Amino acid sequence: MTQYFLSLPHDSAEEPTMATMDPAELEQVMADVGAFNTALQESGAFVFAGGLQPPSTATTVDATGDGPEFTPGPFVKADEYLGGFWVIEADNDDDAIEWTKQASRALRSRIEVRALQEAPPA
């Protein structure tokens, strides 16, 4: 079975967090996402998921030179950033897209889906 990465983009100008959402809307979104996660788990498609803190909390580490260098903030400056994700298992792209449609409805947001690379044959 192929693993897929479902990612939730955020507008980097706003750096939204759950704390900035309307409490009633947040409660409904959390209920909808909880139902989506339960459906993933019951189907056996759920691998793991997580939400990320905003890019301003990142530290970029570069240990490719003589010593590690640490830079506050994200490595990439972009109009959008990754706010959260799921890793799921699905038999094919069509099944993964069906799960992605459900995630998009639950979060009321765009969701990107991509298959993870598989290890090359030995």
Image (cartoon, rainbow, N blue to C red):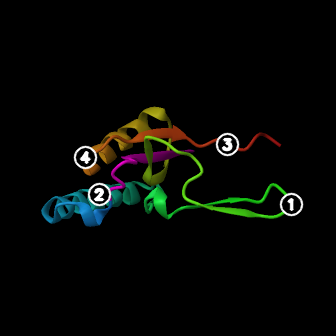
Q: What is the three-letter code of the residue carrying label 1?
A: Asp
Distance from disc 1 to disc 2, alpha carbons, whole Å, reads 45 Å
Residue 35: x percent and y percent? 27, 59
Residue 56: x percent and y percent? 47, 60
Magenta segment: 2-16
Q: Is residue 98 left or right of residue 46?
A: left
Q: What is the three-letter code of the residue carrying label 2?
A: Val
Q: Is residue 118 left or right of residue 49?
A: right
- Mark 4 — residue? 108
Give the label, 2 or 4, closer to the camera: 4
Give the label, 2 or 3, closer to the camera: 2
Say which element carries label 2. Answer: helix
Q: What is the three-letter code of the residue carrying label 4?
A: Arg
Closer to the N terminus: mark 3 or mark 1?
Answer: 1
Closer to the N terminus: mark 2 or mark 3?
Answer: 2
- Mark 3 — residue? 118
Q: Are marks 3 and 1 in contact (CB under 8 Å)?
A: no
- Mark 2 — residue? 33
Q: Is residue 117 left or right of residue 31?
A: right
Distance from disc 3 to disc 1, alpha carbons, whole Å, reads 32 Å
Q: Residue furthest top?
A: 94
Res. 23 image quadrant = bottom left
Residue at the (43%, 43%) spot, across then down: 80
Q: Is residue 91 above or below residue 55?
A: above
- Mark 1 — residue? 66
